[in-house]
Image: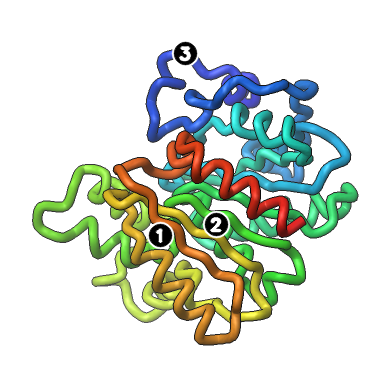
Amino acid sequence: MYLAMRRTLPTLALCAALLSSSAAVQAAPEPSPGRTFSYGGHARQTVTVYGDGGPALVILHGGSWVRDTDWSGWARWFAARGFTVYDTDYRLATDAAWPAQRDDVLAAVRWVKRRGGGRPLVLGSSAGGHLALSAGTYGSGAERIRGVVALSPVASPYRAWVDGGRPGASAARRSLRGSAELLAGCSPDRDGRRCRNRWGDLAAKSHASGANDAPMLLAHSAEDFVPVAHSTELAGAQRALGMRDATVRGEPGNAHGGVLLNSQRLRQAVLRWLRQHT
């Protein structure tokens, strides 16, 4: 029942740009229907595979760690362009606190490798971008992942928590603040050292190791409610540690996450970057 609901969202839900990035996918040759597999025992620990035989691309949806959003349209789009796409779900913050989500992504990447996908590329949106970067920087990320594309990544949930508490913060930033606190399972301003350590662990920058991490392409819009500072801070730390392949792209407008792919310029840049890193 859960999987059927996830793959057949109502038309109205597809119109919500921040909840679904599949709505605006341009028509493209469609590969065979996706095949869904479990990589763990929880109902959300699933991978739906599109395409066959091409370079492996893991997609991690956004949704502020509390919503499951639909990426099946973009998964088919990338599969039609030669990738074997693994549209990956993971436990939400309502299911389990951090680091359960990173653990799920690492488990899914191992599942892809066992299935013959080798070291995959990973594309993540918003909260999924955070998880993609977390997997790409944890330990020696380059040993398990070829490269990360992150669209509006919440690279520092603590920064998002601070931004959401500022006077005049937008509703989107206030909401993200609450989701980040739910993900951490504690509040950084009142719950002690163990909590502060968890918030530190949440930040991709805290695991940066330069050349040992997966190359990364990071993108934000100029008015993104997850500001580009999330990515420039991470990329700067990686370059200081010796990474030569950390690119931050800015796009005009206020698009967030997967909606950034509606820009043909960025869409083609992402496709080109992925192909260069296969």
**Foreground: 8 or 84?**
84
How far apart, in angstroms, are the residues tagged by discs 3 and 2? 28 Å
User: How busy is the neighbourhood of tag 2: few (under 14 within 10 Å), some, or many (20 plus)?
Assistant: many
Q: Residue at x 76, y 41 (%)?
A: 83
Question: In which quadrant is the C terminus drawn?
Answer: bottom right
**Residue under numbered circle 3:** 11
Question: In which quadrant is the N terminus drawn?
Answer: top right
**Foreground: 22 or 262?**
262
Residue 153 location (% of width, % of height): 45, 55
User: How busy is the neighbourhood of tag 3: few (under 14 within 10 Å), some, or many (20 plus)?
Assistant: few
Q: Amino acid at mark 1?
A: Gly
Q: Amino acid at mark 3?
A: Thr
Task: Name which of mark 2 and mark 1 comes first in the sequence.
Answer: 2
Residue 101: tell me if it is visible.
no
Residues at marks 3 and 2 touching, judged by CB atoms closer than 8 Å:
no
Outermost residue, top side: 11
Residue 131 shows which numbered tag?
A: 2
Task: Name which of mark 1 and mark 3 comes first in the sequence.
Answer: 3
Nearest-to-viewer mark from 1 and 3? 3
How far apart, in angstroms, are the residues tagged by discs 2 and 1? 17 Å
Residue 185 shows which numbered tag?
A: 1
Task: Name which of mark 3 and mark 2 comes first in the sequence.
Answer: 3
Residue 10 location (% of width, % of height): 48, 14
Q: Secondary structure at mark 3?
A: helix
User: How busy is the neighbourhood of tag 1: few (under 14 within 10 Å), some, or many (20 plus)?
Assistant: some
Nearest-to-viewer mark from 2 and 1? 2
**Foreground: 38 or 269?**
269
Q: Amino acid at mark 2?
A: Leu
How far apart, in angstroms, are the residues tagged by discs 1 and 3? 34 Å
Q: Secondary structure at mark 1?
A: loop
